[in-house]
Image: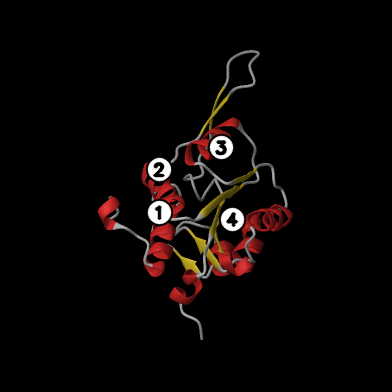
Amino acid sequence: MLTLADYCRNIRLLVLDVDGSLTAGGIIYAAGEGSPGLEIKEFFVRDGWAIKHWQRAGGAFAIVTGRRGPVVERRARELGANFLVQGAEDKIPAWEQTLTSAGVEPHQAAVLGDDVPDVPLLARAGLGAAPADACAAARKAARVVLRHCAGRGAARELVELIMRVQGSWNTKAGGN
């Protein structure tokens, strides 16, 4: 029987959902008369730091999200995402294309997802992870349910777990 560490050893690609995974899931709209409005999302800086640490160690990073917007595009650019798929109502084709583009097999990918649209990816990934506050279906499909909630350290916890197993979590670089 494989252990959690066994699943972590071969991970080369992180695939993260946004709303409810990389963010806490809240969306704020601010609109003026005659304007399409402004969408606001809050990202957790320590999640971003861990993702950059993962990339410096040679890992690839993708965002696959069902929503579409400039905020996600900007955050993906800031984090240096290797792949960004927005507007993926059915995430399976986006997942398959991302794996092909990254040159990895499903068992080499970790997915962080929180809700029903993420369940197929959580089940197919080498390591499916759900934030502590994910819906019941996502928690059930995930191989690991993280201690941290979405947008409050879940992504960092996943990255740190994988990198510690792989021996690449460098505490001298600021990780703790």
Q: Does residue 64 appear to the left or right of 43 in the view shown? A: right
Q: Which is more N-terminal, label 4 or label 2?
A: 2
In percent of width and height, residue 106 lies at 63, 66
**Which residue type does callout 2 highlight?**
Phe
Q: Which is more N-terminal, label 1 or label 4?
A: 4
In percent of width and height, residue 3 lies at 46, 79
Q: Does residue 71 appear to the left or right of 50 in the view shown? A: right
Q: Which residue is mark 2?
A: 44
Marks 4 and 3 close (CB-CB < 8 Å):
no
Q: Which is more N-terminal, label 3 or label 1?
A: 3
Q: Secondary structure at mark 4?
A: loop
Q: Which residue is mark 1?
A: 156
Q: Which residue is mark 4?
A: 115
Mark 3–mark 2 Cα distance, whole angstroms, equals 13 Å
What residue do we see at 62% from left, 46% from top? 65
Q: Residues within 10 Å of mark 2 (few under 14, many from 20)?
A: some
Mark 1–mark 3 Cα distance, whole angstroms, equals 18 Å
Q: Residues within 10 Å of mark 1 (few under 14, many from 20)?
A: many
Mark 4–mark 1 Cα distance, whole angstroms, equals 19 Å
Q: Which is more N-terminal, label 3 or label 4?
A: 3
**Which residue type does callout 4 highlight?**
Asp
Q: Secondary structure at mark 2?
A: loop
Q: Which is more N-terminal, label 1 or label 2?
A: 2
Mark 2–mark 4 Cα distance, whole angstroms, equals 19 Å
Q: Does residue 169 appear to the left or right of 9 in the view shown? A: left
In percent of width and height, residue 8 lies at 47, 69
What residue do we see at 63% from left, 55% from top? 102
- Residue 72, disc: 3
Q: Secondary structure at mark 3?
A: helix
**Which residue type does callout 3 highlight?**
Val
